[in-house]
Image: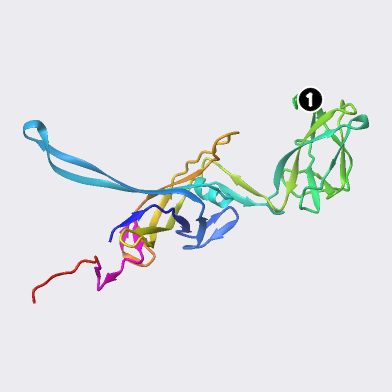
Amino acid sequence: MKFGVREICDVVFKAKANVTIGNTKFVKGQPVLYIDTAKTSTLEGAATTVYAQGGKGNTRLIAWEGEKTLTFTVEDALLSPIGFAVLSGAGLIKADNKNLVHVHMTTDVIAGAEGVCEITYEAFDDETTTICNTTDVPVFGTVLDGSGSGIKFLGAGTFEAATATVNVKSTTIENAIEVSNGKTCQIKFTGAVEGQVVRIDYYIIKSAGAQTITIDAENFAGYYYVEASTLFRRQDTGVDMPAELVIPNVKIQSNFTFTMAATGDPSTFTFTMDAFPGYTMFDRTKKVLCAIQIIGTDAVDGVEDTGHTNHQKD
């Protein structure tokens, strides 16, 4: 049997030990990340060769091979927060009452009398929108010209009206302005003239429905048990056979590039994995770099059916 290889791989990363990513805990063997939107997947083996050389012309006489390496690379078209945490070693925190997420916002409004600007919150799913308002992080305004450039930078604004002012328990927040969905919040900027376009720069506070990915200098991508599903196509029948690549011990390289441009193709996200010897889940007798399972080879009594007649003497 001969086969061709072309189909992309669907990949699953499983925890090699109990691990916590952000505020989510995974046990050994539990799937951490699935990739089913890959663009390319490449399995590459390499080895170094040294030679004994001598004689006339210093020709090669004997070869020794070693330093075998195996690299599995997956280029994903899309990325999830947990996927980026796996790729980069970043922390992943889901917003809750203990882990508030501060989201930067800008809103352009037309100033009213005495520089009062109104914002109506109707686009958020929450019943209320909470605006960060502290002495360190106040709400700022900038007067714009017709092209959207700032021509006058205003000081911190003061809230004229809100449905409630609430204290928020946090080490970084002194107080917050809470505005009910569909209600209007009024902010006054000294120096703003009625009719001018003012860009308001502020932060809203999310205690749900948001995540923060934190990249620091101390944490890197980890080790995982990887299984990749693909299809190998038989030459003789044209039938696709399921194939499974099992790489029991990979270390993901902590490299990534986000390319953000107005034109061209969108960014892709590359997972480059170095394979190390490890035991597969069902064979603890020998460490391997990779095991490739092919289903549908039509073996008969352990011997592949090649389609040829074996002529033997009686």
Residue 246, can we see it?
no
- Tell me: 137 left or right of 258: right
Locate residue 206, reporting x and y percent. 73, 49
Locate residue 227, reporting x and y percent. 42, 59
Q: Residue at x 74, y 39 (%)?
A: 105
**Kind of residue at badge 1:** Gly
- Tell me: 10 left or right of 139: left
167, 119: nearer the viewer: 119
Residue range of the region highlighted in magenta in the rendering: 286-305
| Magenta span includes 94 | no
Locate residue 247, reporting x and y percent. 38, 56
Q: Residue furthest top?
A: 151
Q: Residue at x 19, y 40 (%)?
A: 50
79, 115: nearer the viewer: 79
Q: Splitting the image into 4 quarters, where does residue 148 fall? A: top right
Q: Splitting the image into 4 quarters, where does residue 104 fall? A: top right
89, 5: nearer the viewer: 5
Element marked by disc 1? loop
Q: Which residue is mark 1?
A: 146
How many circles with numbers are drawn on the protein?
1
